[in-house]
Amino acid sequence: MGNMSVMATQVFGMWEKLRGVPGGTRAFSLAFTWKAPYFRSIRPRFVQVSPNYASLVLPKRRAVQNHIGTVHAIAVCNGLEAAMGALAEATVPSGKRWLPKGMEVAYLAKSTSDLTCSAETDPDAWSAGPRRTGPGEGGPFRRHGRGRRHHQPVGHRQEVVMRSPA
């Protein structure tokens, strides 16, 4: 259990240490994807990490596009999951850990630009559930989804809502 709170302290501590130095947010983003290699595929650029809030930019580039030239829905899901993961690592209460439990996504419109994926909770939300959002550059929502995540001990659940405006 103590190791889990050390990890949370490490993630937030590393962000605090690196964010103010030239190239620091890039170094943090690379370190985050080194620890969780699956996220390397989207090349997230973290903008903010703090208890109860995290945001990143998911750059629109060929590797994350689908056959019609828009950002692939699963790439958007990866960005939202990375934002929630950073938030969770910086926020998870001592003696608990977070685990993703599921995700549902609705395709509402095309994602045609870089996206900002953010996750936000209030301190009480760790028992009620956090909200995740992934905004792009203005306009209506592109993606909407609900994910389920729970904490250990088993039985502590969170509903996660993701939104991604155009």
Image (cartoon, helix red, strand yellow):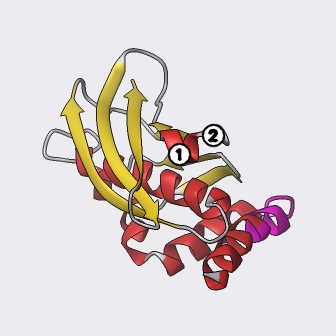
Q: Quadrant of residue 71?
A: top left
34 left or right, relative to 139: right
| Rendered location of residue 161, percent (x, y) | 39, 35
Residue at the spot 53% in from the left edge and 45% down from the top edge: 127
Name the residue carrying label 2.
124
Residue 20 located within the stretch drawn in magenta: yes
Q: Is residue 120 magenta?
A: no
Assess disc 2: are there few (<14), some (14-19) or many (≥20) residues with their C-alpha within 10 Å of its C-alpha. Answer: few
Pointer 1 local density, CA inside 10 Å: few below 14, some 14–19, many at least 20:
few
Picture quarter with the C terminus: top left
Local secondary structure at mark 2: loop
Report the residue that reaches farthest toward the top: 139
Q: What secondary structure is found at the residue carrying circle 1?
A: helix
Q: Which residues are magenta?
A: 13-21
In the displayed structure image, the side of residue 1 where residue 44 appears, left or right: left
Q: Is residue 20 left or right of residue 66?
A: right
| Residue 13, x across and y down, in percent | 79, 69
* Dominant secondary structure (helix, strand or loop) of the stretch shown in magenta: helix
The reply to whether residue 55 is visible in this rendering is yes
How far apart marks 2 and 1 lie (CA) works out to 6 Å
* The one of 10 and 34 positioned closer to us in this rendering: 10
The one of 48 and 60 positioned closer to us in this rendering = 48
- Amino acid type of the residue that numbered disc 1 sits on in the rendered structure: Ser
For disc 1, the marked residue is 127
Task: State whether residue 165 is above or below residue 59.
Answer: above
Question: What is the number of the mark on residue 48?
Answer: none
For badge 2, the amino acid type reads Asp
Residue 157 rendering spot, x and y as whole percentages: 40, 51
- State if disc 1 and disc 2 touch (CB < 8 Å): yes
Most foreground residue, 110 or 17: 17
Q: Is residue 20 above or below residue 13?
A: above
